[in-house]
Image (spheres, coloured by chain):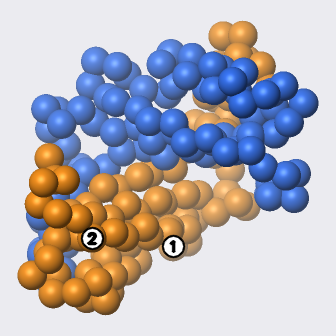
Chain colours: A blue, B orange
């Protein structure tokens, strides 16, 4: 079994409003931070998973992302996967 | 002025408990997804910013991250910055 490090990025679909992001952008303007054109807040899920190979890890993470991490009605997700030595894991 | 695409990843500090992540890990187990050793949920903030150069963009984003995006008592943040053509922006 190998360990894989994964990051699933869950973001609101472009057509879905992001009031928290808009509020943050307005607050940034009030703070004097100029030039912010777009600001959208999503989730970043950091995962360490044990699997026999990268294919198996990817399949498990795709099920996890589809079924638990993202609400597919309003959210998209992308998966970044890399193998790692046990030293990388804190 | 150039446009820069940035992603700020905000994660709970390692010493801070993540009940939402733990609940998701338990739910994954019940769903039959095996091998998940660690699962922690953070924020991913996608930003497009106008600035004269990369240094200026980075400085503004560092202030934004420190003051608005992360709660430095319990969270760490990392910044990924790249320049982008206007075609990349949706």
Helix, strand or loop at disc 1?
Answer: loop
Helix, strand or loop at disc 2?
Answer: strand
The residue to which callout 1 is attached is B72
Q: Nearer the viewer, residue A60 or B88?
A: B88
Q: Is residue A21 left or right of residue B70?
A: left
Query: Where residue B83 is drawn, which disc sits there?
Result: 2
Location of the N terminus of chain B (image quadrant): bottom left
Nearest to the eye among marks 2 and 1: give it: 2
Label 2: chain?
Answer: B
Q: Position of residue B75 (x, y in %)?
A: 55, 65
Query: Where residue A90 is drawn, which disc sits there?
Result: none
Q: Residue at x 55, y 42 (%)?
A: A80
Rounded to the nearest angstrom, the CA distance separating label 2 from label 1 is 27 Å
Q: Is residue B16 left or right of residue B85?
A: right
The relative height of residue B56 versus residue A83 in the rendered view (above or below) is: below
Label 1: chain?
Answer: B
Asked which quadrant contains residue B62, the reply is bottom left
Q: Is residue B37 visible?
A: no
Q: Is residue A46 left or right of residue B86?
A: right
Q: Position of residue B52 (x, y in %)?
A: 15, 87
Number of numbered discs on residues: 2
The relative height of residue A43 versus residue B72 in the rendered view (above or below) is: above
Q: Within 10 angstroms of label 1, few (less than 14), some, or many (20 or more) residues?
A: some
Asked which quadrant contains residue A88, the reply is bottom right
Q: Residue at x 42, y 26 (%)?
A: A70
Asked which quadrant contains residue B35, the reply is top right
Q: Earlier in the sequence, mark 2 or mark 1?
A: 1
Q: Nearer the viewer, residue A15 or A29?
A: A15
Q: Is residue B12 visible?
A: yes
Q: Residue at x 48, y 19 (%)?
A: A66
Q: Position of residue A59 (x, y in %)?
A: 63, 19
Q: Within 10 angstroms of label 2, few (less than 14), some, or many (20 or more) residues?
A: some
């Amino acid at each position: 079994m190998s360990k894989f490090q994964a990051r699933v990025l869950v973001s609101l679909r472009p057509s879905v409003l992001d009031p928290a992001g808009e509020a943050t952008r307005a607050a940034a303007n009030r703070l004097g931070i100029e030039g912010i054109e777009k600001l959208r807040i999503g989730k970043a899920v950091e995962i360490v998973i044990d699997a026999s190979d990268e294919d198996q890890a990817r399949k498990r993470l795709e099920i996890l992302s589809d079924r638990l991490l993202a609400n597919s009605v309003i959210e998209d997700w992308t998966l970044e996967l890399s193998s790692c030595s046990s030293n990388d894991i804190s």
